[in-house]
Structures are given as C-alpha cells and as structure tokens.
Image: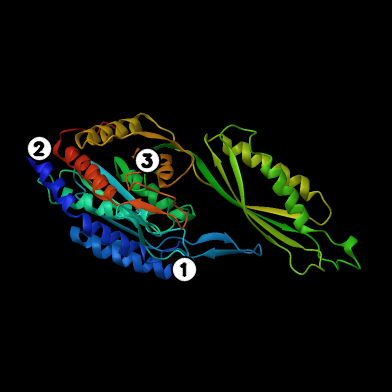
Amino acid sequence: MNQDYQNQLNWVDAQNDKMINNVIELAEINSGSLNLDGLERIKTKLAEQFSSFDTPIESIALPDLPTIDESGNEFDQKVGQALTLSKHAHAPLQILLMGHMDTVYDLNHTFQRCKWLDKNTLNGPGVADLKGGLVILHTALTALEQSPWAGQIGWQVLINPDEEIGSLSSSALIAKSAEKNDFGLIFEPSLPDGTLAGARKGSGNFSVVVSGKAAHAGREHHLGRNAIRALSDFTGKLDDLNGQVDGVTINPGFIHGGGPVNIVPDLAMLKFNVRITQAEHEKWFLDQIDQIANELNNRDSINIKIHGKFGRKPKLLDENTNNLFGLIKQTGEKLNTTIAWKDTGGCCDGNNLAAAGLANIDTMGVIGGSIHSSDEYIKVNSLTERAKLTALLLMRLAAGEVKWEG
C-alpha cells in the first residue's frame, strides 16, 4: 500500500481512545428530535469539533414541522438547526458526507448514560445511531485533509437535526445539497454483522383524527357517536391491508382517545407508519385509506380526517450506486475488510438522496445494533475500522488511483 496512505491509516489507529471519548461525550448530550436545547448543545459541540477544518460553518434554520397532537389539533412543531460546511468547491469531484445529530431518546427517557458491556461493547443512547458515525466522519475527513491529496477532491458535510422524525423539515436542504455533489456517504450504522444496507423501503407517517358525538353514557347513550369505535373499525381495516401487496407493511403505532367512561367519546386519534418497496405502492395505499375513510364518514355524525404523507421514496440500487458499492468493496479488500450489502426495510436520508438522483451508500458508520432501544450498542473497534475505510476511499479518489464514473 502507498506509504502516504499508510501514514494516515496509522494516524487513524492512534485516534482510538479519542474517538471513544468523543462518542461518549456526544451520546451523553440528550438530543432527542424535539429537545431543542439539547440539539443546540450538540450542534455547538459539533461546530467546535469541525472548526478544525478552517472553513466557515453555517447553522441553517429549518421550517417548522406540521404536527398533530394527541387531541387531534394541528400545530407547527419547531425543529433544530442543521449544520453544514464545505471545502475545495472548485475540485473536479465533490462528495457529500452526511449524518444526523438527533436521536429517538427524549429528554425524559430513562436511557441517558453510556456504560461498558465488555471491553469492546459500549452501550449508550445514540452511540450507533448516529453519534459514532459523526465521530467516524470527522476522523476520516481529518485524515484526508492532512494527507498529500488535500484539495484534490471537494466535500460538503451536512448534519441535520430531524432524521429520526422523517427529515421533513430538512428535505429541501438535502435535495439542494444533492444537486451540488457527485455522490454521497451517510454514516448510519451498518447492520450488526457489519453488512451495509442496499435497497431500502420507502416510508410514510400518517395521523387519523376521528370526531364523533358526545353524550351521557347512561341516559342518552343512543344519541352519542363513539369515536373510539369508529377508529377501531378504521384501524382494523387498515391493518387488514397488510399482506395484500407484496412489500407493503402498515404499523398502527399510537392511539389516543376518550376520557371519563360515563361519556360517549367524541374524539380519538391514531398514528401509523407504512413502508413500501415500489413508488407505485404510494397511490395504491392512499386510494385504500381514502376508501376506508369514506366508508366510515358515511356513518351518522362520524368525521374522519387523515393527515400526513409519504416522506421518503423507496431507495433502489441503480448502476451508479452499484459502482459506488464496488469502490467501497475494493477499498475494504485493501484493509482486509470484507464488505457486503443487502436490502433492508429501514429507511434514512439515503432514501432522500436517492430520490434527488444522488448515488449514495448510507451505512458507513459503526458496527452496532439494538438501535432505537435502551440496549443500543457499538463495537468500539469498528470506530477506527470504519474511519480507515472512509479515509482510504477518499484518499484513493483524491490521488486518482480510482475514478468516480457516475
């Protein structure tokens, strides 16, 4: 291997303890998607770390997120700010490096601290998804910038605050960034065995608000129109759509309604998620839920409103994405690391980049697992392993050893 490559890879190895400490520091700053104070704290910490690149760092305010509360009321939810920086804009090859600063653990969640499960396994909130990935991104980019090929490729870093709630507020910013770059790398965690994600399902989040008619449960029960019953019927019919089209899955995930049991409930609401494998599934699904709602709206004094939309298109593997996988696989071989990939039902900002026409690999982060639970963990040896993978890929491209043909 080129000695200049090896020097930088040796430098990455020497960062092991520092990387672990950085992951713990970031993970123990609560940055749940709606914890605006926590998101500001972690954005400030990230800006401090990325200031090492001696290039302007921009905080970008994002539009509010239209939201439905438990009572069925619409309101605009404020979200955190995105962070972006770029360098070498005139280089012939431009690469987008992405991650997110938010986690699924809110300020009141019991999971707030890191702990060691064994000498190679660290448990903590967001250690895999995605704070370990942010540390890898920074370390790999530092290795490139201190190599002899700094400036031979350009790059943009984009870190958004709303990935875990669908990236609806940052979607326009992501699409705009996609237009300026040749391909993207996103630092989501790999699968627990180190496999990268290939094709991904698309996703939509929806809320259903059912209005009925209140009445005394004893004296005038017959005058009431039970919103919980109507929503139960809707939910049953919704769940029955599972299995009707291959690759479409629907998950009713939250339900709320009613109050004192001596009152016929006049309000109930449901939140659900749907996953699809093909873009044409969107129309089929929307037609189905409109039909279900229309049937129930024909009932006396029952009114059903559906809110939400598909926020992420399915990510399919095109020629450019397969070529990018090939470059990463070749790079892994030089590090004696086997790189494989397979399709997954999960979705992320890789879907957004693909929808904007940008080839990307979206699992360049740590090896870990049990994400979105209190058992979330990373294998800490993967911090340097994955940082070297990205650093070597970037250096090979910058040195002209390999070329991007996308």
Query: Disc 3, disc 1: CB below 8 Å?
Result: no
- Mark identifier at residue 379: none
Query: Disc 1, disc 2: CB below 8 Å?
Result: no
In the picture provided, is 338 more to the left or to the right than 262? left
What residue is disc 2 on? Answer: 2
What is the crowding at mark 3: few (fewer than 14 residues within 10 Å), some, or many (at least 20)?
few
Q: Which badge, 3 or 2, comes first in the chain's sequence?
A: 2
The Cα–Cα distance between marks 1 and 2, rounded to whole angstroms, is 47 Å
State the image coordinates of residue 193 (x, y, percent, origin top left): 37, 40
Q: Which badge, 1 or 2, comes first in the chain's sequence?
A: 2
What residue is disc 1 on? Answer: 107
Assign the N terminus to one quadrant of the image: top left
SS for callout 3? loop
Q: How many marks?
A: 3
Name the kind of residue labelled 3 in the image: Asp
Is there any visible trace of residue 238 in the rendered image?
yes
In the picture provided, is 355 more to the left or to the right than 306? left
State the image coordinates of residue 51 (x, y, percent, origin top left): 22, 62
- Residue at image position (19%, 38%) is 397
State the image coordinates of residue 221 (x, y, percent, origin top left): 88, 63
